[in-house]
Amino acid sequence: MAQPKNRYWVEFAYKGTSFDPFTYFDSKAIERRINNNVPLCDSSDFPVNEVFLEHLTSSNAEVIYASRWLNAAYIIADDVTIDQIREFNFVKSAKKVESQLVISSLYTEALDDQNLQELAERQITLMKGQLFAEKGITGKGVRIAIFDGGFPNVDRHPAFEHIRSQNRILATFDFTKNKQHAYRGNSHGLSTFSNIGGKFGKLFLGLAPDAEYLLAITEVNREIFKEEVWWVAAAEWADQMGAQIINSSLGYTEPRYTPQQMNGRHTMVSKVANMAVAKGILVINSAGNEGDDFNWQIIGSPADADSVLSVGGVNPYTGLKIDFSSFGPTAERKLKPNVAASGTTVAAKGADGYRRVNGTSFSAPLITGFAACVMQLYPGLKAMEYFDKIQQSAHLYPYFDYAHGYGVPQADFFYTEKKESKTFSAAFVPTSILKSVHSFEKKNNQEEEKSITREIKIALPKEHSTTSSFKAFDYFYYHIANAKNELVDYEVLIPVKEFTIPISHPDAVIFRAFYQGYFIELILKNE
């Protein structure tokens, strides 16, 4: 009777191989590594030892992929075989694999051309992205890798005609079938690609119409166990091919993982995403659509990784977190999402159509296009320097919360003279419109009895009058942080006249608020 087989990552104890970076890497990868001070001959780039792989195969294991970065092989083997493999002196460990992948999109909706045009304009103007195009900044020369479930019709859809006509889709690879053809599969990738560099008639659907592209299929619905290895393989391929940005709208959550494991280090894809950034690639990932799932709710992996620019979704007409967008922070209460963009967009669908689509899958590509423009504007910076610039350009910065991150990046940040932050002091009666959903601290009765209720009185700038003048984005944001700068509460209010904010949390140390470009920070002290 045949034994059941399982999937394993077999990690090797050493490599024992050599490497020539100039024959392996694209010239753009060499340039990127030099800019990021990454060694051209790093041991993590050396190939896996072929002798080790031959031993695995001769032991009746099926080798699916050998990862240079991890010095490991992804294999399928039965219990007898894996026990034998664990005894090899060159094997460091063999860990069983299970996973579930979630594509971070929701649903589509047909709209008439006028409504499509209005939304297409809105998804760009929300970031003031039209300023980039007016200045001739269109992502030209920036190389972007897109990881998704498929790219059918990209080779014929009119949204990409300007890219195809200039041969700027440099390579495609289907990691699920191990072949060089990606114009098949789930149409999700068609839509995400269009929100990076596609067009709707004369309108931009994304901010990088002049970038170069690498397309990788890393997911197929019926193979729930292999998607992580395909993501790993695609990241190494993107590195070799000279990608400067990876856009991923994929997330790994349950049933393999728990919310407590979303700490940025636990999952294989988070580890590899951080490695990609260490090699000079800016990794941008959607935060996920678990905002309405009260059994999960926080972001998935690899959006939880420290060095990954995690993107949440906002309502394009209010600027507030859209319902489905996942909340941060990470399991260790580090800031996520980092920034946000419209969670509702116009995207390419079918052979030649366009639809309204919803999901943080489409927020992340908008930020990827934005990032490509920043790279064109500031060539030669390190990946994390681009990361920081994008965060600093967001409309709430330096304020943040676990719903919006630092807010929506703004192109005019790069074209206006930097001024000192405006501030304010005291008060009106607020109407709450977004309240933190998290119980960040569990308080026992004794702690509650000892807590001291304090009040913050807010004086708004003189130009603020009444609700009759209120318009979208005129919200009052505030958060309360503990001594570790972890948020214990946050809220968004519609301003009226005067108000006070009670502060009763026992760990409250810092109060910050943002209103119409005004920012204040107070250190809370008990009298």
Image (cartoon, grey):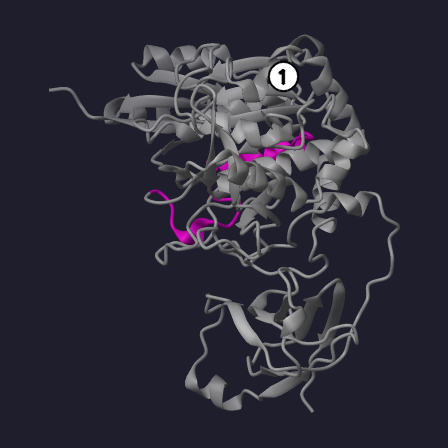
Quarter of the image that includes the C terminus: bottom right
Tell whether position 49 is magenta.
no
Q: Is residue 374 visible?
A: yes
Residue at the left extreme, as displayed: 1
Residue at the top extreme, as displayed: 23
Task: Give the residue displayed 55% in from the left and 28% down from the top.
Answer: 194
Query: Which residues, given as a range, are shown in magenta?
Result: 256-284
x%, y% of residue 310? 57, 45
Name the one closer to the observer, 399 or 139: 139
x%, y% of residue 276? 61, 31
Name the one closer to the observer, 80 or 26: 26
Q: Is residue 21 above or below residue 189?
A: above
x%, y% of residue 481? 62, 70
x%, y% of residue 338? 62, 50
Tell whether position 283 is magenta.
yes
Q: Is residue 12 visible?
A: no
Residue position marked by numbered label 1 in the rendering = 163
Where residue 55 sits, quadrant-wise, is top left
For mark 1, does the 10 Å Cα neighbourhood hold few (<14), some (14 to 19), or many (20 or more) residues? Answer: many
Where residue 19 sits, quadrant-wise, is top right
Q: Is residue 437 above or below residue 94?
A: below
Q: Is residue 452 above or below residue 139?
A: below
